[in-house]
Amino acid sequence: MISDFDDHLIHQTSNPINETSQSDRNFYDRFWFNGFDREAAFLFEIGFGLYPNRFVMDAHFSVSIDGEQHSFHGSRRAPRERSETQVGPLRIEHIQPLRTIRVVLDPNDTGIECDLVFRARTFPSQEPKNVMYEDGRLMMDTSRFTQFGCWEGHFTVNGSRTEVSPAQTLGTRDRSWGVRPVGEPAGGATGVHMKEPGVYWVWSPIHFDDVCTQCGTFQDHDGKPTQVSAAIVPTYSRPEDIPRHEEPGHREMATFTHRIDWEKGTRRSLGAEFEFLEHTGEKHVISLEPMIHLQLLGIGYQHPEWGHGVWHDELVTAGEHWELHELDPLDFKHIHVHQICRARMGDRVGIGTLETICFGRHDPSGFKSLLDGAP
């Protein structure tokens, strides 16, 4: 299992790089990006994952524009070389790690193409580890960092080309790795706690001119946080100005609280408000107003066919298209959503992403069953 990376001083176990530290089939390593126009004219997202113990690599590119969503999906056998980040026509190139990354989707049968460069405007911010158990069995054990940036380049959908400029197009990316449910589910009995299944997750990275904010929380059915974090980070006008190994301006919040204004009869937000509390006692209130949204189904989440880590064949690609207004917002596949929102924090006006996924009972929201809508 020796590969090129074994010639670098990067080993963390006694195994070759291609051999994961554990045999859990759900071990993964993943990229995610989004990019959006400051006036919400479009929103695109990229998902790219390696599942070494399932021998699968998959990639997705999806665009929400003019009330429609267009998606490219690709899957292949996982390569032996970890530096090979390409699935068919879609590839990711690290021009300068943690600073400049290129995403290319070459011409293909789906009619969706792109050549986009992400340039960082913040230091990568590491989030708390996410560890979850199901009846004593480790279900999730992941690390993740988030980074803000801007985009340059273009994307094309069915012959219509959209130019993307760094002055007008912001975005966020994350890198995560570890263990989480992917691919075909395991057989056998379900855990006793799955008798009342549910997930409540809210995550929101926001761009302002001089700072960016991020926050995220998991909650149980009663609304008790099982994970909560929030931070404010400074921005930089050039990637080369970003500190290399530590961000002295990073301000981790003592805590934060949030409120979602759910659209009646759905599990989609009409708006949100966050309250950040600094260790000094200073408070910051952030209000969000949604403008455009994208179904996470388009990059594989809850997808019945193109879910993450699912084996298709040596190399398969496909495309999809939806009229967004025709989708049932209470269909399980459509619960997971990203909304690009106008944001306000004091005198600051910004823009960013609100991610929500909520199925099952959640008492503070008024949800009483698996997929009932907001009262």
Image: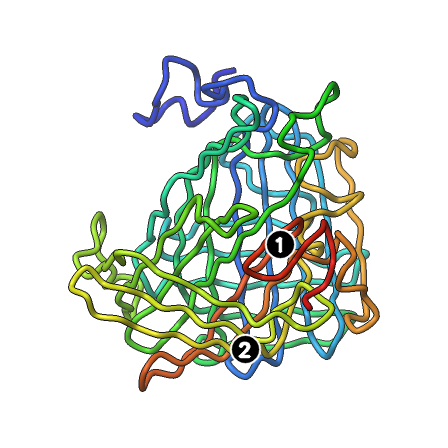
Q: Amino acid at mark 2?
A: Asp
| Horizontal and vertical percent position of residue 52 | 58, 26
Of pointers 1 and 2, the one earlier in the residue sequence: 2
Taking depth in this image into account, of 259 and 22 the one nearest to the observer is: 259
Examine the rendered structure and indicate whether residue 301 appears above or below residue 78.
Answer: below
Name the residue that disc number 1 marks: 358
| Horizontal and vertical percent position of residue 337 | 64, 61
The picture quadrant where one finds residue 123 is: bottom left
User: Alpha-carbon neighbours of circle 1 within 10 Å: few (<14), some, or many (≥20)?
Assistant: many
Q: Residue at x 66, y 40 (%)?
A: 197
Please give left or right for residue 310 compared with residue 198 in the image: right
Please give left or right for residue 30 compared with residue 58 in the image: left
Examine the rendered structure and indicate whether residue 95 appears above or below residue 348.
Answer: above
Taking depth in this image into account, of 100 and 290 the one nearest to the observer is: 290
Disc 1 versus disc 2: distance between alpha carbons? 26 Å
Q: Amino acid at mark 1?
A: Cys
Name the residue that disc number 2 marks: 37
- Circle 2 sits in a helix, a strand or a loop, which is it? strand
Q: Residue at x 57, y 76 (%)?
A: 290
| Horizontal and vertical percent position of residue 353 | 51, 67
- Circle 1 sits in a helix, a strand or a loop, which is it? strand
The picture quadrant where one finds residue 257 is: bottom left
Please give left or right for residue 173 compared with residue 363 in the image: left
**Is there CB contact under 8 Å for labels 1 and 2?**
no
